[in-house]
Image (cartoon, rainbow, N blue to C red):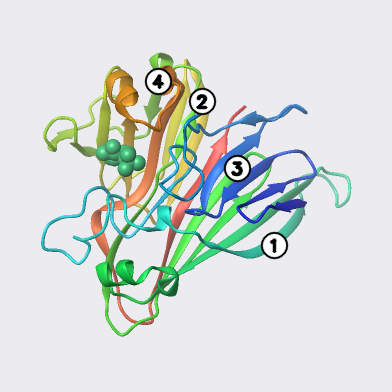
Amino acid sequence: VDIADDNSSITATLPSGENVTVLLHGATVTSWKSGPGAEKKENLWVSEKAVLDGSKPVRGGIPLVFPIFGAPPANHATSKLPQHGFARNLRWEYLGKSTSESTTSGDAGTGPTDNSVKLDFGLYSANLTDEQQDQWPYDFGLVYSVTLSRDTLQTMLNVRNEGQLGFDFQMLLHTYFRIGDIGSTAITGLSGVTYTDKVLNATEHAQAENAVRIAGETDRVYKRIPQSTTSIVEGDKPRFDVVRDNLPDTVVWNPFKEKAAAMADFAPDGDYVHMVCVEAGYVSDWVRLEPGDTWEGGQRLRSLL
Ligand code: BG6
């Protein structure tokens, strides 16, 4: 496994050619390439005008939302924080890699060898500015693990309360998937689930059809989903599976034509047809973490090429 570290991002490449890049700013995954041939294909969408210098969150890839999803509520411990919290807007520490090899089939030594690599990143309350520590005065340690194997990328967050006070948080993995055409894309695995429609005045609805299709601005919070896998299907071909681990919710977001054009860092304007956000998270409720306790949750993404 090859690891490249240019002091602003880490890129890991497997012997079979798959690779992942994590920007230290936000521990944002900005590229994930996989596929059967020699030429690997990008799975994530990143805006051509994404700001990567640390001055704002990245428009694309997998920004990590913590400790609040969306705009914070009034009269709450998170009220002074910016939308989606601070984690996507701070430089994380690269903690190192671990690799493993496993033989997938046949007698030992005869089957193909599957490599995987795990990259760990850390963010601690001491990394916050004084102003940020005043805005959210808790002692915490975050370890974010990004594991690349042949056709999957796993991203897991471990949260530890290192202080004397309990705290409540939300988290979400804001994955921007690269797709061929939003018009022929469906999201499945949400049927029967109740969602809050942020485009329709936060009203609640039940998902009737098995396939969620996007024909206009879409911003829905699907809550307490019983099935663990949500899929992105192009035409009748499954393209991605998102398997949630200890995360009850999923946000489906596409800004569509007008909102995309209005976002300064969204480019090209027409690229809303090539992306969809399917965001696994813990956002319908709060995770309560008492002093000394830890919590872990995340997702496993599978690219079906
Ligand atoms: C989604 C929210 O998760 O993120 C949307 O549900 C929001 O309401 C979108 O517009 C993008 O947020 P931001 O802060 O990255 O522009």
In whole angstroms, how far apart are the C-alphas of marks 2 and 3? 14 Å
In whole angstroms, how far apart are the C-alphas of marks 3 and 4? 29 Å
Up the image or down, 180 lies above or below 291; here it is: above
Q: Mark 1 points at which residue?
A: 98
Amino acid on which disc 2 is placed: Pro
Q: Name the residue under label 4.
A: 269
Mark 3 vs ligand 1: CB under 8 Å?
no
Of labels 2 and 1, the one closer to you: 1
Which residue is drawn at the image coordinates 40% and 45% (left, top)? Answer: 228
**Can residue 215 be seen from the camera position used here?**
yes
Q: Mark 2 points at which residue?
A: 238
Of labels 2 and 3, the one closer to you: 3
Residue contact between numbered discs 3 and 1, judged by CB atoms under 8 Å: no
**Can residue 251 be seen from the camera position used here?**
no
For the residue pair 208 and 138, the one nearer the viewer reads as 138
Badge 1 element: strand
